[in-house]
């Protein structure tokens, strides 16, 4: 096997949006989501149907996460058991209540990545020094995304359904041209500044298999890197890439052997925000039934100061 090239060499000629929205910018391509874009999204609310896209946190069979991370661990701190044992706090009037506590990776559920989440050559999005990540992201953390919010026209492209499968295979790839073709087959067109929501069926498979099988030879399906694909994202001014996989792209690019090159080519260089680990099966089934693949997409991750990412429960309205 030949050695994978260094990320910086692979992306030497790759375009960047650094400085496009000013030297202090921390939200990147979300700047494309102007008030006019919000209203374009609102015009796609036609039936009053609502879908939420977060996977459950603390599922009995565990939560699907990037290898090495853990899902949340949730503990009860106070419940009726405390009063049964005579240890519950006493309040005037006899108030009883339940409290709980959870701990886990900020990227251990459906989540927004901060734009400063990945880098190479010692620089994160917008040219900030990678040393600003030390001890917490001083620049391009998830907080500015949380404080801004994400609202626009979303479009679902169901790659699994397009390929006649319940879910794409491990390591199965597709390109921007495949997305355009799949959208066309759905009877819709991906428009400039659309929030791109792609279904592979992969996260749904977590709930139908064992963790051992899910992680065996871990290689998610997804978009694969090419200079043409990056140009397409740039030209289409895509603000946000949303998928039902853990990392939004094929885990290792089959051509170069590089792991997660789109994280750098799209997120670090173009400022495209990534929303990962979404639950898209119900939304996709509904879109296939009523033929409406476009909608208002709204989301705001938790406002975690200096966070590398944060959980989110995006809401889609059709
Ligand atoms: C990594 O970048 C490793 O993971 P993700 O973007 O999926 O959180």
Image (spheres, rainbow, N blue to C red):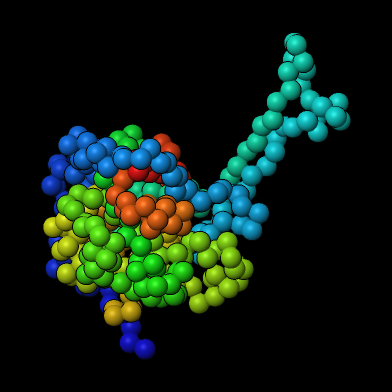
Instruction: Tell me where residue 33 appears, x and y as whole percent.
Output: 22, 41
Q: Which residue does the image show at 60% across and 49% down from the upper left?
A: 58
Residue furthest to the right? 85
Is 3 placed above or below 18 here?
below
Is 304 placed above or below 268 here?
above
Instruction: Tell me where residue 259 appears, x and y as whole percent.
Output: 36, 71
Quarter of the view holding residue 277: bottom left
Q: Which residue does the image show at 74% across and 15% down from the upper left?
A: 91
Residue furthest to the top? 92
Q: Which of 136 and 16 is in front in this view?
A: 16
Quadrant occupied by the N terminus? bottom left
Instruction: Tell me where residue 181 appears, x and y as whole percent.
Output: 24, 68
Q: Can residue 43 be seen in this view?
A: yes
Q: Which residue does the image show at 36% across and 73% down from the upper left?
A: 163
Image check: 310 left or right of 272?
Answer: right
Q: Is residue 68 visible?
A: no
């Amino acid at each position: 096997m030949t050695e994978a090239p260094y990320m910086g060499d692979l992306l030497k000629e790759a375009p960047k949006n650094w400085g496009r929205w000013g030297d202090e910018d921390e939200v990147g391509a979300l700047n494309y989501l102007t008030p006019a874009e919000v209203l374009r999204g609102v015009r796609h609310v036609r039936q009053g149907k609502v879908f939420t896209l977060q996977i459950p946190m603390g599922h009995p069979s565990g939560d699907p996460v990037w290898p090495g991370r853990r899902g949340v661990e949730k503990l009860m701190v106070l419940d009726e058991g405390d009063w049964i044992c005579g240890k519950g706090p006493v309040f005037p009037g006899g108030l009883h209540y339940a409290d709980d506590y959870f701990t886990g990776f900020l990227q251990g559920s459906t989540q927004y990545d901060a734009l400063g989440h990945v880098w190479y050559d010692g620089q994160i999005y917008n040219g900030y020094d990678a040393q600003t990540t030390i001890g917490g992201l001083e620049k391009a953390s998830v907080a500015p995304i949380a404080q801004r919010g994400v609202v626009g026209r979303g479009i679902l492209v169901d790659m699994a359904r397009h390929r006649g499968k319940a879910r794409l295979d491990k390591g199965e790839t597709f390109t921007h041209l495949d997305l355009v073709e799949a959208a066309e087959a759905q009877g819709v067109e991906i428009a400039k500044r659309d929030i791109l929501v792609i279904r592979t069926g992969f996260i749904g498979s977590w709930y139908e298999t064992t963790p051992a099988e899910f992680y065996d030879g871990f290689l998610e399906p997804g978009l694969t890197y090419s200079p043409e694909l990056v140009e397409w994202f740039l030209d289409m001014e895509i603000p946000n890439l949303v998928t039902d996989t853990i990392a939004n792209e094929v885990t290792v690019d089959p051509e170069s052997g590089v792991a997660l090159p789109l994280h750098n080519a799209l997120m670090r260089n173009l400022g495209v925000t990534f929303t990962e680990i979404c639950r898209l099966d119900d939304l996709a089934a509904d879109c296939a039934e009523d033929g409406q693949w476009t909608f208002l997409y709204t989301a705001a991750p938790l406002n975690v100061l200096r966070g590398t990412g944060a959980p989110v429960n995006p809401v889609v309205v059709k």
